[in-house]
Amino acid sequence: MFRATPNRRAISLIGTPSPRCNRRISAQSSTFNTLQDSGGGQLSENPRGSVFRNRRHACAIELDWMSVVSRRAPGLVPHVYASGRRLGEVDVGWLVLRRAPHHIDSSSHDDCRKLMLAAARFQQVALDIDRMTYPIDAAFFEWCMPEAIEADCPGPGEDVLARLHQDLMWVDEQSPRVRCHGDVHFDNAVSEVPGGPLLLIDPLPRIANWAWDAAYAQMLSGKEGTPRLVPLLAEARRSLGLPTGDPPALERLETILLGWSSMLWWAIKPFRRDDPWFAEQVRWYLERLASSNSP
């Protein structure tokens, strides 16, 4: 238990890996903000209190990456004041972070451009960081795609699964896999003041095509009005001197990754299935991929 204090810090608690983490998915782990009163009871909002961001069922990989990136790239993640792997007698990773309570608008083109630039910067910084990562590979999709099909995913999911290995081979031919942030979405982009520099939180780095961060964010937390994120990430990478592969292949790359991301989120985010707009997006992306020419 931590007591609220009037400084500008946050505490993130990182628990031991859950079965979901072991399956290389972070999406349904719970991140939430709470405040604790001076008596140690349930939290009520106190403008003088610090925000404690309690990360449950998260992987300790976040502890390592937040600490390393904070040192190597100040201004890309919230400043890490301290970290550790135990609290008293309890095996639990923890971080003390500078408080950054403000979020961005997923329908704002400007905000989306800033998010993709932050994702590109993370990929740039991660190039030579030798820490644990998870692969986005055939086994990953052979797990989530059948689950999506079983959950009545709209569109030709079976056709997308059948061509997975061909499409994956084509994607790998376009550009080398990189270390992605792995959990880029609009709730994982924060700032200390409204409109301030954008900071990324909760990294769960994946070895994947560079555009995976964008396709992941598009289908996890995109909404009607969210611009296309893959071209924005390509633009951001080019501005940093990072490769994006053959420009004419970008649209096909986007088609494949959005189809895969659609099936991932249909499988593991059941509450989104009730959103007619999201269901139609999933159908459209899968039909687009299934009808495209095989590599």
Image: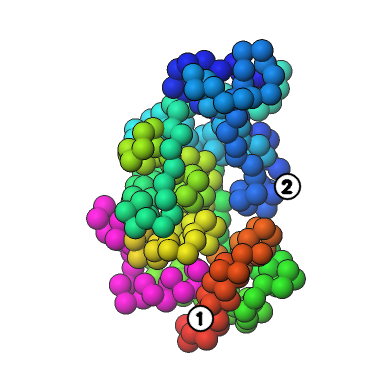
Residue 146 visible in rendering: no
Color theme of the render: rainbow
Residue 271 visible at all: yes
Q: Which residue is mark 2?
A: 19
Which portion, as a residue range, is magenta? 234-258
Under mark 2, the amino acid is Pro
Q: Residue at x 67, y 53 (%)?
A: 23
Query: Which quarter of the rendering shows the N terminus?
Result: top right
Q: Assign a secondary structure to mark 1.
A: helix
Of residues 133 and 215, the one drawn nearer to the viewer in this rendering: 215
User: Where residue 264 sits in the image (x, y, percent)?
Assistant: 61, 63
Please name the residue that numbered disc 1 is placed on.
Answer: 288
- 273, above or below 199, in the image: below
Nearer the camera: disc 2 or disc 1: 1
Is residue 48 part of the magenta span, yes or no? no
Marks 2/1: CA distance?
33 Å
